[in-house]
Amino acid sequence: MHITFADEAPVFDGDDLAIHFAALIDGEPVVCSITAEALEDHFGAKSAREEDLLDAYARGTARIRAVCAEVLDDNGGQPAVLRSGLFRVAGMEPD
């Protein structure tokens, strides 16, 4: 399974308080998300407002994508929701 990420801009979801972004699994798009809580806890989002979450996502894109790739690899390429606790899991901490 080859995992990459689309160059498309992430999308704010006010109903779920999350940012959605596209991963590509063998070239096929899979929508993944990171919660506002994860962005606040680990990437410095000041609030759950759209601009704060998008700024935090931009700052943490490399780590978010790295963790997402691990999750996608583990779950067989199914859509993934990255929650705060996932960034504390052994092996997913930053180097």
Image (cartoon, rainbow, N blue to C red):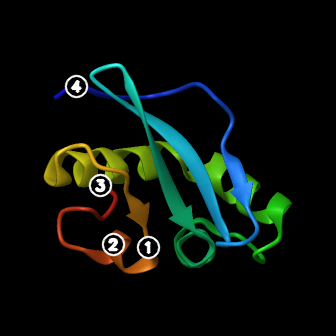
Q: Amino acid at mark 1?
A: Arg
Q: Is residue 81 above or below residue 84?
A: above
Sequence-first tag of 3 and 2: 2
Q: Position of residue 35 (x, y in %)?
A: 56, 70
Disc 2 target residue: 86
Q: Is residue 68 left or right of residue 84?
A: left
Q: Circle 3 sits in a helix, a strand or a loop, which is it?
A: loop
Disc 4 target residue: 2
Mark 1 Cα-neighbour bin, 10 Å: few <14, some 14–19, many ≥20: some
Q: Amino acid at mark 2?
A: Leu
Sequence-first tag of 4 and 3: 4
Disc 3 target residue: 95
The answer to the question of whether label 2 and label 1 lie on touching residues, with beta carbons closer than 8 A, is yes
Q: Position of residue 91 (x, y in %)?
A: 18, 63
The answer to the question of whether label 3 and label 2 lie on touching residues, with beta carbons closer than 8 A, is no
Q: Report the residue at 26% width, 55% height from top.
A: 71
Disc 1 target residue: 83
Q: Nearer the viewer, mark 1 or mark 3?
A: 1
Q: Amino acid at mark 4?
A: His
* Cα separation between marks 4 and 3: 23 Å
Q: Quadrant of the N terminus?
A: top left
Q: Amino acid at mark 3?
A: Asp
